[in-house]
Amino acid sequence: MVNQVPERYYMLSESNPETIHVAYNLDDGYAEYTCVSIVSILANTHSKVHFHIISNSISEDNKKAFLSLNEQFPNSYFSFKKFELPFSLVLSGHTYLTLQTYYRLFLGYILSDIDRVIYLDCDVVINDDLLCYWKEDIKDKVAGVVCSFSSSNTIRKNVLGISSENMYFNAGSMILNLKKYRKLNIFDDLSNLVQELYKKTTQAKLMFANDQDVLNYIFNLNNSHIFLNQKYNFEDGINSYNNSLQLSKDQKINDWVEAINKPVVIHFCGSRKPWEPVLKTSYHWHLYYKYKALTPFYDPLDEERIVNYNSRKHLTETQALIPAHLYMQLYWRDVFARSAEYVKQVIGQRKLIFWGASKAITHIMIIFASRGLYPNAVVDGLATNHNKRVFEYTIQPAEILQGRNGEYFIVLCMELKGVFNFVSTLLKDYGYEKKSFIHAYAEVYEREEQFLNEVCKHEE
């Protein structure tokens, strides 16, 4: 259980409003990654930051590594709090998780001497002054959280009793009002609740998300959380292309533009982390090494590894024969960004229209808007999609384009080449010339055709 008198290495005034409290749960295996995360905070933040390191065991060498940061960053303070789970809990699914993840459930109890904290997973880096996050107004709620857009969320919400209008959140970055959290009195029956939710999710053939599922259930049951901008828990996985964004009814496209242009908390979700040598499945992985170089864990060989990895990635992107669908998984953001840059050059005074209602429409719109290209309308040819909303835009019938070929420039957002060919023929029937529209995926299929031509030449 919690030490009665936590070991305090630096004393500070708890009443100082500029002191930011940050909590991490970890074991020795995550000490390096936590240290990198801490340095990313200190390198960007001017306020005093008090780090609460919670563990059931952490070596003296790793404690010294954390404490050595104070020489470089005198605004840092550390408390080490020993904690052990009071009962046996389920650890399911993800092999990179440890039982320390469940410590989040007990933060109100562990940190009994403070009333507000930012909780962060160990696999995040901070890309801005953390004070902006600390000052977020969470109203009268227990927690400020950020939605997750996992593809399993619709089923998961149903299993956890979360209404379809509400969103499932990722618990890797949260602001907690610990005073209100303690009043929820969740600890007495927590073991039974974990077992009950584990049984429900596994029966639904879902991987139990451990304490994250529990927190979603508790906060939803008590209406005790508020959703913050995506920039405070930016899930930085390239495979997010596979998922439709889970949008609330009041989310605007600019909320996501702000997040993608300047995320504050970058979260390397999933099992593949930036320190994995084979494949970097995030867009900001290089930041991990930028801040690692400022820690006691600095490895001079990292620079050589980064150069080698960048070289392999460049060869893969430009020369490897990759099927279109796989190329999209790896490089979708770059593909849409290059399409947006082309549109900026040719659109002139025409209004911008997006045609499509696939799961990728949100991703395309965000990438375009992040470059200043906002839609005037979103249309689709299927009547079943009409009146659905994408951000603040209501999908309209494609017939509104007829007779207005000099007024609009159209971005076609359907992934399948055959559907694009059909729609482009329809647009020509509407009177649109080829220079009046573009396929958002054009680069992918042009690249595939080039490789197919090369293969044919080689076979001849």
Image (tube, rainbow, N blue to C red):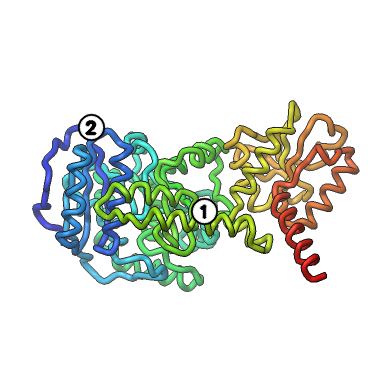
Mark identifier at residue 17? 2
Where disc 1 sits, the SS reads: loop
Where disc 2 sits, the SS reads: loop
Q: Which residue is drawn at 42% across and 67% down?
A: 208
- Residue 359: x and y in percent read 64, 53
As drawn, 53 above or below 13:
below
Q: Which of marks 2 and 1 is nearer the N terminus?
A: 2
**Image side of residue 38 versus residue 344, left or right:** left
| Quadrant where the N terminus is found in the figure | bottom left
Mark identifier at residue 451? none
- Residue 152: x and y in percent read 53, 61
As drawn, 396 above or below 209:
above
As drawn, 308 above or below 113:
below
Q: Which of the two residues, 448 or 107, is positioned nearer the viewer here?
A: 448
> Amino acid type of disc 1?
Phe
| Quadrant where the C terminus is found in the figure | bottom right
Residue 222 visible in this rendered orientation of the protein: no
Q: How many labels does the image show?
A: 2
**Image side of residue 62 versus residue 382, left or right:** left
Q: Which residue is drawn at 24% across and 52% down?
A: 296
Q: In which quarter of the image is residue 4?
A: bottom left
> Amino acid type of disc 2?
Pro
Q: Distance of mark 2 from mark 1, alpha carbons?
A: 34 Å
Q: Which of the two residues, 218 or 102, is positioned nearer the viewer here?
A: 102
Residue 367 visible in this rendered orientation of the protein: yes
Q: Which of the two residues, 284 or 385, is positioned nearer the viewer here?
A: 284
Q: Name the residue under label 1.
A: 149
Q: Quadrant of residue 216?
A: bottom left
**Image side of residue 362 versus residue 96, left or right:** right
- Pointer 1 local density, CA inside 10 Å: few below 14, some 14–19, many at least 20: many
- Residue 154: x and y in percent read 54, 58
